[in-house]
Structures are given as C-alpha cells and as structure tokens.
Image (spheres, coloured by chain):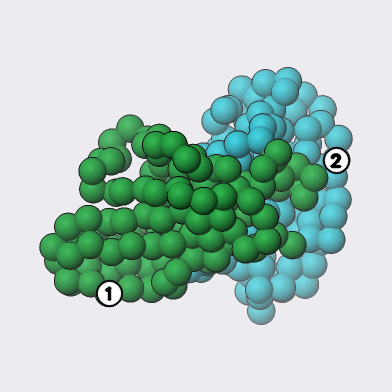
Chain colours: A green, B cyan
Amino acid sequence: GAVVSQHPSWVICKSGTSVKIECRSLDFQATTMFWYRQFPKQSLMLMATSNEGSKATYEQGVEKDKFLINHASLTLSTLTVTSAHPEDSSFYICSATPRGGARAMNTEAFFGQGTRLTVV
Amino acid sequence: DAKTTQPTSMDCAEGRAANLPCNHSTISGNEYVYWYRQIHSQGPQYIIHGLKNNETNEMASLIITEDRKSSTLILPHATLRDTAVYYCIVRVVSNTGKLIFGQGTTLQVKP
C-alpha cells in the first residue's frame, strides 16, 4: 500500500528555536498534503492544507507565520515550527492523497506515523 | 460535512465482536461514512467506508441503517491489538483527502 513517511519521529528542542518536520509520500505523487496537530487525549486538529507549488491554506486560528509550510515537490511537504515554545509541544501528523484521489485505494488519505515535538 | 456523534469509550472482551456505533442524523445523500482508527502514538489507519449498502473487508464490517442516520462498525473478533481510538467521519467523496476528525470512541479490548 501507499506509504507516507514523516521525519523525525520525535524531536526535543529548546524554547525559541525552530524545528522542521518533513512529510514524504514514498511511492506516489501528492498534489495535496495536510498537517494535523494532536494534543494528549484529544482528537486530531487540522492545521493547514499544503498545495504543491502554491501557498498553504491555514485553518482558522492557526498562525501562518508560526507554522511555515512548504510543498516544493509532489512528494515532499515540510512544516517548520518557528520560535517554538512549550505550548507547541504536540504530536504532529501529516497526510497525503495521490494525484487523482485515493478512492481506487479505498481511502481518502494516507497518514504518516507522526512526529512528537517536545519543547523544553 | 455532517456532524457525527460517538460514545466516548467502550470495552470489549478479546475474541468477541466489537460493535462501535456512530450517529450522523444530518448526513446528506452524497456523503459517505468513513471509519479510521488511531493506535496510540501512531497516524490514523483507514478501516472501511460506505454510502448506503453494508460493506465488509478483511478488517471490519460496516452496517449503515436504511435511513443512513446511523452506522455501526463491527470488528468480528477483537484482539488486544484492536485497542485504539475509532473515528467515524462523514464527508463527500473528493480527490482532496481532507478529513475532519471528531472525538472518536476509545475502544479497550480486554483479555
């Protein structure tokens, strides 16, 4: 089946630094990728839609200058958490959909394994 | 996308069937019912989806009521590895892949 890989799986950074998380579709091209954030014991919250070759679309309440998204190729989207603070500590998950949709593969999207960010 | 309502948590004995309900009383005619699950600290995993007919695959069965206002996900022989949060999502099928997650049901399979 289609694979979406996130890197790193976990990261610890100091407050005030920036952290980049990569999301790669390994065996398909994805014109659209999504970024989610999940706090402990809560559901996934959609942060933004990443479109290849264009600006990301952010959900209401998500600061675009703090969460920088770059989708430079059909297989890679990156999320950079800038000037991270302890409240940014969370589980970040990406998903990707093949060009033309994923219905032939009986799913709407393929998810990465997630990245646990801890800001100290 | 239509709103869904799921119980917060459920228990199930290992080897027994797990029946997870979902209410979606405002579902539209062109909206599908999707089920995903998330095992602790992993990304969500697709389980099954359907429009109005009952569906079955190697993982589960999906039973949708005739009026489509509710559905039940059935794991026929639950194992400890099925312990996870199960999300019922109602949406129009599209090529975008955008999914909005509700709170889901935490299923605890007990030995």
CA separation in Å, label 1 and label 2: 45 Å
> Mark 2 packing: few (<14 Cα in 10 Å), some, or many (20+)?
some
> Mark 1 packing: few (<14 Cα in 10 Å), some, or many (20+)?
few
Residue B78 to residue B20: above or below? below
Residue appearing at x 81%, y 51% in the figure: B61
Residue appearing at x 27%, y 74% in the figure: A12
Res B101 label: none
Q: Amino acid at mark 1?
A: Ile
Tell me the element at label 2. Answer: loop
Instruction: Please state the horizontal and vertical placement of residue B90, each as a whole percent of the image.
Output: 63, 34
Which residue has dot 1 on it? A12
Tell me the element at label 1. Answer: strand
Which residue has dot 2 on it? B54
Q: Amino acid at mark 2?
A: Asn
Instruction: Please state the horizontal and vertical placement of residue B55, each as a whole percent of the image.
Output: 85, 45
Residue appearing at x 66%, y 75% in the figure: B80
Instruction: Please state the horizontal and vertical placement of residue A45, each as a whole percent of the image.
Output: 42, 46
